[in-house]
């Protein structure tokens, strides 16, 4: 069932002010387990004569596994929100199913994965502008301090926040740590500065990213 008009309005206000909104528990465990297994399968067959090391990052997943991945693209709550922000001309850019490997605590100490704006993101001018693209990110396990939370700088899609290249992998004074639960989906403005956190869990950190544009 799609969201009510009022809940869309509330989400749009949050999205305009903070640069993101979170849909909680959109996907159940059975669905997520099927996606984890597909990522494992693709990783297991990714080695070949031109790829000596396994790959854990797989784009174009709607083409690779259409029946399995269609629910990640077509959830009505997500599409209702997209159309409310973008208008009716919403299109899929890419669906990526991937994982971040684990690393040691020593390697991760004091680092973030790398601050960035998404594709077509630009330095904002101090006013809200409709995004050129939107990222729907879902992690397939609960994020804690070991798996590593998502980091965002709220309203950096409006304020002209710049990060020097020497500080791209350092925590930011204005950052917010987002501990998403498995199956939650966060929708981010393509101008929002965000970063992952190094994964020290001893396991892969699985996620998918659905990138939409107009």
Image (cartoon, grey):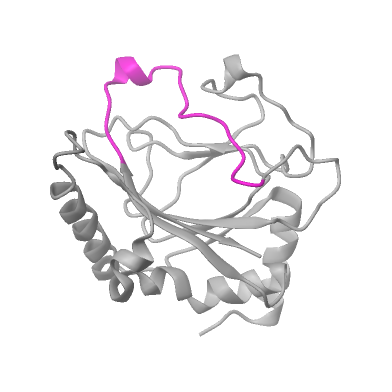
Q: Position of residue 119 (x, y in %)?
A: 60, 46
Q: Is residue 198 magenta?
A: no
State the image quarter where residue 11 is shown.
bottom right
In the figure, is residue 55 to the left or right of 24? Answer: left
Q: Nearer the viewer, residue 31 or 134?
A: 134
Q: Magenta-highlighted stretch: main secondary structure? A: loop
Instruction: Report the residue at 18% width, 46% height from top.
Output: 46
In the figure, is residue 59 to the left or right of 52? Answer: right
Q: Position of residue 83 (x, y in %)?
A: 66, 74
The stretch in magenta equals 100-120
Q: Position of residue 169 (x, y in %)?
A: 51, 22
In the figure, is residue 124 to the left or right of 91? Answer: right
Instruction: Report the residue at 41% width, 68% height from top.
Output: 72
- Residue most toward the front? 49
Instruction: Report the residue at 27% width, 21% height from top.
Output: 104
Q: Is residue 115 magenta?
A: yes
């Amino acid at each position: 069932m799609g969201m009510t008009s009022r809940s869309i309005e509330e989400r749009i206000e949050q999205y305009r002010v903070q640069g993101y909104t979170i849909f909680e528990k959109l996907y159940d465990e059975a669905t997520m387990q099927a996606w984890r297994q597909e990522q494992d399968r693709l990783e297991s067959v990714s080695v070949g004569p031109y790829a000596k090391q396994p790959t854990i990052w797989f784009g174009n997943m709607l083409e690779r596994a259409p029946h399995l991945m269609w629910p990640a693209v077509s959830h009505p709550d997500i599409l209702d929100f997209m159309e409310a922000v973008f208008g009716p001309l919403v299109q899929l850019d890419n669906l990526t199913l991937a994982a971040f490997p684990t690393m040691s605590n020593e390697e991760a100490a004091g680092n973030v994965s790398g601050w960035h704006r998404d594709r077509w993101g630009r330095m904002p001018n101090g006013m809200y502008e409709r995004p050129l693209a939107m990222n729907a990110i879902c992690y397939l396990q609960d994020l804690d301090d070991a798996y590593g939370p998502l980091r965002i700088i709220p309203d950096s899609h409006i304020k002209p926040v710049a990060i020097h290249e020497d500080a791209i992998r350092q925590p930011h004074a204005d950052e917010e740590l987002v501990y998403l639960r498995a199956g939650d989906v966060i929708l981010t403005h393509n101008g929002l500065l965000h970063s992952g956190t190094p994964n020290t869990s001893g396991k892969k950190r699985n996620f998918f990213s659905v990138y939409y544009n107009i």
